[in-house]
Amino acid sequence: MKRPFLATALVVGLLASLPATAQFQKPADAVKYRQSAFSVMGTHFGRIGAMVQNKVPFDAAALAANAEIVATMAKLPFAGFVDGTAEGTKALPVIWTQRAKFDAGAEKMQAAVLELNAAAKTGDMAKIRPAFGAVGTTCKGCHDDYRD
């Protein structure tokens, strides 16, 4: 009875000790990963924007579903910003020399996305619009500082 428990505890301990960031075989894999995550996030953020800007009819359920996807995706791309992945991309090398500032910007964006997700669940456009704007501001700030 003790052996299976110990074996399970050992496996869990080993898995917990692995780095939290994704492992990439080559720098191009990390770039593709982060670009894909940003692409999906941008697509769903754009769908919200179309409703916020009255370009498409407001659908509270669709907006909430898109906000949920954006909230999930907002956590993913930053694992792909590993050393050696700036060349040939729009990412500026300053990301790696100002990593703490870059990471703080990512956290600010993620917090704004959580606020948007909460506002979206209310179905109240008076709450959604400013939350959407706050996310856009954090995205623009990062693009201005870290994207060519």
Image: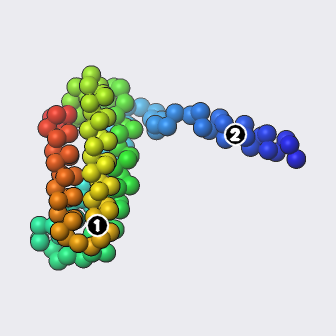
Left or right of 120? Residue 125 is left
Q: Is residue 27 visible?
A: yes
Q: CA distance from mark 1 to mark 2?
A: 40 Å
Q: Place residue 42 in its image quadrant.
A: bottom left
- x, y percent for residue 8: 74, 43
Q: Which residue is mark 2?
A: 11
Q: Which residue is mark 1?
A: 120
Coloration mode: rainbow
- x, y percent for residue 84: 33, 26
Depth check: give the residue in front, 86 or 144: 144
Q: Residue at x 38, y 46 (%)?
A: 76
Amino acid identity at mark 1:
Ala
Depth check: give the residue in front, 101 or 124: 124
- Secondary element at image label 2: helix
Residue 45 drawn above or below residue 147: below
- x, y percent for residue 116: 27, 59
Residue 97 drawn above or below residue 32: above
